[in-house]
Structures are given as C-alpha cells and as structure tokens.
Image (cartoon, rainbow, N blue to C red):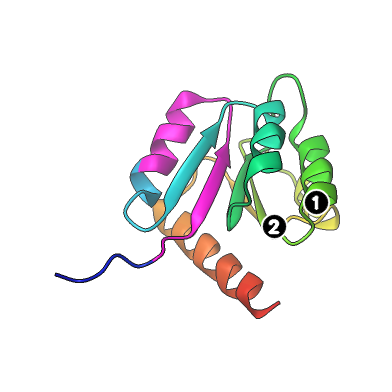
Amino acid sequence: MASETHKPTILVCDDEEGIRESFKLILEDNYSLKFSKNGLDALELLKSFTPDLMLLDIKMPKLHGMEILKQVKALKPKLPVIIVTGYQSVETAQEALRNGAADYIPKPFDSKHVLRSISQTLQEAAKK
C-alpha cells in the first residue's frame, strides 16, 4: 500500500454553495480543502492556518473580493490567490493582478482550466 503523500491545502472562499460544491468535486482527489462562505470567515480562518493556495470570489456579501484580496496579501503576502468571478471584465482582471492575485478564472469555469491554473500557480509559488 502506497503511503499518503502531502496534499496541498486550498481555501475556497465563495458565497455560492453550488460553486463550493463544484470546486469540491473538481479538487478533492488532489487537494485538501477548506471552505468559507464569505470574506470575513476566510480572513478569520487565515489567522489560524496558512493554506497553500486560495480561490477567491469577487462578488460577495459583507466584504468585496478585492478588499479581501488586499487584506489577505497584507496578512499572508506569499499566499497565492486565484480570483474566480462571474463578472468578467478586463478591468477587474487587471485590478486583481495589480492587487497581488496570481491568476483570474472566469465563471462558468472549466474543470481542466481550474486544475491547470492551480497546478501552475502552486509550481510558481514553490519557486519563490
């Protein structure tokens, strides 16, 4: 029997249960997952642990994703964050990247695109 290798941990922050469930189905075989329903919960979680990567929705109640991104980068500057949003615009993507996001995935997303983006982002983070 093969020994269990370390699975990178991903924090998924999205207010939509269906999106969180989709990420669970796509990622659970290769990654350990933690979920938060909003940015305030995510920021609280980040005080007690550091995931290997964060998937962050932009449009959420209580605290906008861009504000969460800024706070995450202040709290954990090396944490790679991939923005996931249904509100596609070049301006939003550019703003996210300026604020420290590693990548930008538009909804609806393709599972292969998600897996490729996460893999590439984790590889880049390992080089730093």
Q: Is residue 25 left or right of residue 37?
A: left
What's the residue at 53%, 61% (across, down)?
A: 118
User: Magenta residues, as a range?
Assistant: 6-24
The local secondary structure at tag 1 comes to helix
Q: Is residue 22 magenta?
A: yes
What's the residue at 61%, 75% (across, down)?
A: 126
The amino acid pointed to by label 2 is Leu
Residue 65, percent across and down? 74, 36
Q: Nearer the viewer, residue 70 or 116?
A: 70
**Farthest residue in the left direction?**
1
Is residue 47 depicted above or below 28 in this figure?
Answer: above
Q: Is residue 86 magenta?
A: no
**Farthest residue in the bottom direction?**
127
Tell me whether circle 2 and circle 1 mark residues in contact (CB < 8 Å).
Answer: yes
Q: Quadrant of the N terminus?
A: bottom left
Is residue 52 depicted above or below 17 in this figure?
Answer: below
Q: Quadrant of the C terminus?
A: bottom right
Residue at the disc numbered 2:
79
The amino acid pointed to by label 1 is Lys
**Farthest residue in the top direction?**
62
What's the residue at 39%, 41% (across, down)?
A: 24
Residue at the disc numbered 1:
73
Residue 108, percent across and down? 50, 40
Please rate how many residues cluster around mark 1, counting C-alpha atoms within 10 Å: few if below 14, some from 14 to 19, many from 20.
some
Which badge, 2 or 1, comes first in the chain's sequence? 1
Picture quarter containing residue 48?
A: top right
Residue 66, percent across and down? 80, 39
Residue 55 seen in render: yes
